[in-house]
Amino acid sequence: MPLGDDSSMKRDELLKGVVVDPNVCGGKPCVRGTCIYIAIILDSLAEGLTHEEIIETYPSLNVEAIRSALAYAAELCREGFPNPLRMIQLNWEARWKGIPF
């Protein structure tokens, strides 16, 4: 089911779980507060691993982090490339709310 106006807030909340910052993981998209690349999560899902298996392998992750990775991938597909200004805005909003990188 496509995301509508009611889901855009949830999508933005999920995207806050992704960090794209040159000072974190060399600028590669990763899960906030970890050094786990979004690509690792997406590769694991593509290989058929369940959420539980991914979390077992990477205990610092949770289901919300996996959903954040999927939301980020969806944003890439929707936009064709990440909107760096939007990601910077989300990262700054998270910093001001005290969410660690």
Image: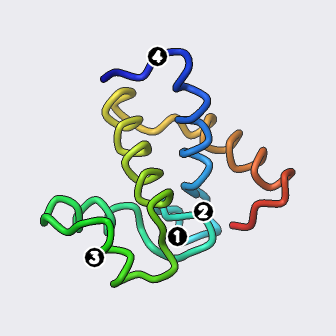
| Quadrant of res 22 | bottom right
Is 63 placed above or below 76 here? Answer: below
Is 95 placed above or below 33 here? Answer: above
Horizontal and vertical percent position of residue 67: 42, 51
Residue 99 is labelled as none
Q: Which residue is mark 1?
A: 26
Q: Earlier in the sequence, mark 4 or mark 2?
A: 4
Amino acid residing under circle 1: Gly
Mark 2 is surrounded, within 10 Å at the Cα level, by few (under 14), some (14 to 19) or many (20 or more) other residues, namely few
Q: Are marks 3 and 2 in contact (CB under 8 Å)?
A: no
Q: CA distance from mark 4 to mark 3?
A: 30 Å
Q: Which residue is mark 4?
A: 4
Q: Secondary structure at mark 2?
A: loop
Viewer-nearest of discs 1 and 3: 3
Viewer-nearest of discs 3 and 2: 3
Q: Which residue is mark 2?
A: 22
Position of residue 83 in the picture relative to residue 55 (left or right): right
Q: Are marks 4 and 2 in contact (CB under 8 Å)?
A: no
Q: Are marks 2 and 1 in contact (CB under 8 Å)?
A: yes
Q: Nearer the viewer, residue 100 or 58?
A: 58
Query: Residue at point 62% right, 48% down?
Result: 16
Is 46 placed above or below 37 here? Answer: above
Horizontal and vertical percent position of residue 77: 31, 33
